[in-house]
Image: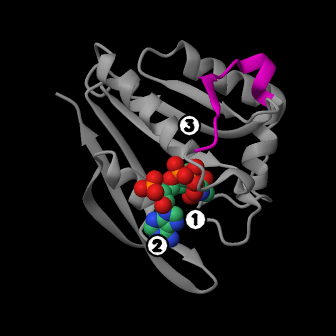
Amino acid sequence: MTEFEIRPVRPLEDASAVLDHVRAVCGEPGVWVVTTADEFQVTVDEEVALLRDLSDHPTSACWIGLDATQRLAGMLMARGGDRQRNQHVSSLGMSVSAAHRGQGLGRQLLVTCLDWAREHELVRRVELNVIADNAPAVHLYRSLGFEVEGVQRGIYQRNGRLHDQYVMAVLLS
Ligand SMILES: CC(C)(COP(=O)(O)OP(=O)(O)OC[C@H]1O[C@@H](n2cnc3c(N)ncnc32)[C@H](O)[C@@H]1OP(=O)(O)O)[C@@H](O)C(=O)NCCC(=O)NCCS
């Protein structure tokens, strides 16, 4: 398996690389994400603020994966609830750059997040949404304990076809 370094994001230092990464993923023709590259209009300052919010929030976190040349190869953001009654819920989104997929980085990022969640005194539920046709992602999530809780039918549109989305979650004891 390829070796990647996983570390918490550093908002000021990493914001620009994060933006380049997300823009590239959104621009892939066959990718199962909602935002298109045209719609992704976030400035560096906005990204710094967003990453700072995640870093400062008690049940949010963000990690990046770096390849052997220290380039950003993937990331995972977990956003915690803002209310007393849902702060134990962390909703995640993740992506690995096309060149680095299938080399275990997605698994490393998700294991890092789940280890953090299990050790966290507040986090009890980690959840995500995934397009049902996104086979590698669904496989990865299931293999680390996420279960499908529901199906949102026809919620995603591509080339005139409607696709379902799974709501998946893992509950931590
Ligand atoms: C989903 C994603 C983050 C996974 O990252 P990754 O680094 O490629 O993941 P890994 O290499 O750790 O694991 C991929 C797993 O999917 C499996 N896989 C690959 N293609 C597959 C397919 N067509 N069907 C089923 N499983 C597949 C791999 O065998 C591997 O499982 P294994 O570890 O049991 O062998 C990455 O594909 C990605 O960024 N996709 C684009 C953005 C995206 O879809 N994000 C998720 C939105 S919910």
Q: Quadrant of residue 85?
A: top left
Callouts 1 and 2 close, C-beta under 8 Å: yes
Quarter of the N terminus within the rendering: top right
| 46 sits to left or right of 170 | right
Badge number at residue 32: 1
Q: Residue at x 36, y 62 (%)?
A: 166
Which type of secondary structure does the marked residue at label 3 adopt?
strand
Q: Quadrant of residue 159?
A: bottom right
Q: Which residue is mark 2?
A: 133
Q: Residues within 10 Å of mark 1 (few under 14, many from 20)?
A: some
Magenta span contains residue 7: yes
* Residue type at the position of mark 2: Asp
- How far separated are the C-alphas under marks 2 and 3? 20 Å
Q: Is mark 2 within 8 Å of ligand 1?
A: no
Front residue of 37/138: it is 138
Q: Residue at x 52, y 36 (%)?
A: 109
